[in-house]
Image (cartoon, coloured by chain):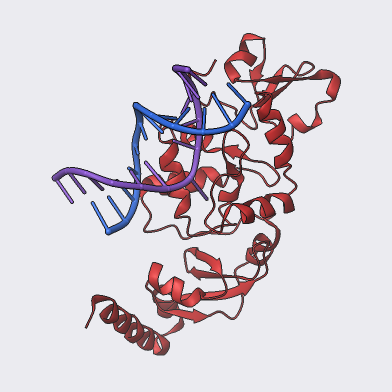
Chain colours: A red, B blue, C purple
Amino acid sequence: MTQETAQDRLIEELGALAADAPDGLLDRIAARWITAPSPLGEVAAAFTDHGVAYVRPARGFAEDFRKRVGRPLLPAARPPAGLVPALRDGRSSRVGLDLRGLSDFQRDVLLAVRTIPRGEVRPYGWIAARIGRPKAVRAVGTALGGNPVPLLVPCHRVIRFDGGAGEYMFGGAAKERVLLAEGVDLERLRELARERVFYLASDTTGVVCFPTCHNARRITAAHRHGFRSVARAEAAGYRPCRTCRPVAAQAAAG
DNA sequence: CGCATGGCCCTTA
DNA sequence: TTAAGGGCCATGC
């Protein structure tokens, strides 16, 4: 018998045991799941008593879950509060997550990504800087590739510094589609990038932002100035926005 | 500019 | 235990 078959058998038996257990115990052993519409199509979400642990397309979900999480999976009577709207349009970010079993690094990455507001994007390097590992840029991408809860941890809002969408577990096109649904104009970001503009500043507030920061979007054309780096903006007398925190992606960039 | 390359660091096989 | 490689990025032609 292969190891995988043995493992499947074990999971199945655990599930059978769990089915007869009292409710409280059951919910500590098994996960529950629901399906819901999302910009990626119909998705399913599995949750434990700690929070949502896994989100993937509804098609083939149970098998994906078994491979990745390996814990009995039972249907849920109702989803946790806020989950369905969060999956539908990414507006509610208050859904509890079960991130046990992840590395510290991956958890740090996911929690940082969760702070990116709907309608905005940040580069991979910004996440790296935020978690105190400014050089672990590629590793951030690796960590996001393993995001167990896409949409809830909005990894689609992390893009390349040059305005390219970058990779995505469901493909780059899907990433652009989700961002478009959230109101992000990637085309404009790429245009700016072509002119070497990665930050926008306002000469009325003296603040420099990432272009998608809601503060940056209110700058009128007459007062808007583009910059190639935070360092250059600071040299021109601007300070980084305290909302979007455009820390210098790389210290050397001048 | 567009492309290639080298550095970086976490994860997996 | 190690080595290879990835959802990147700055730099050098």
The residue under the point 42% across, 85% down is A22
Q: Is residue A27 left or right of residue A156?
A: left
Seen in the picture, residue A214 relative to A40 is either above or below; the reply is: above
Query: Which of A87 and A77 lies nearest the eye of the viewer?
Result: A87
Query: Which of A70 and A29 lies nearest the eye of the viewer?
Result: A70
The residue under the point 42% across, 77% down is A30
Q: Is residue A250 visible?
A: no
Q: Position of residue A29 (x, y in %)?
A: 39, 75
Q: Is residue A129 left or right of residue A82?
A: left
- The quarter of the picture where the C terminus of chain A appears is top right
Seen in the picture, residue A136 relative to A9 is either above or below; the reply is: above
The residue under the point 77% across, 15% down is A203
Q: Is residue A220 visible?
A: yes
The residue under the point 48% across, 77% down is A62
Q: Position of residue A73 (x, y in %)?
A: 45, 78
Choose top left, top right, bottom left or bottom right for residue A37.
bottom right
Q: Is residue A253 left or right of residue A9?
A: right
Seen in the picture, residue C12 relative to A171 is either above or below; the reply is: above
Query: Which of A227 and A99 lies nearest the eye of the viewer?
Result: A227
Q: Position of residue B9 (x, y in %)?
A: 34, 36
Q: Position of residue A121 (x, y in %)?
A: 64, 40
Choose top left, top right, bottom left or bottom right for residue A134.
top left
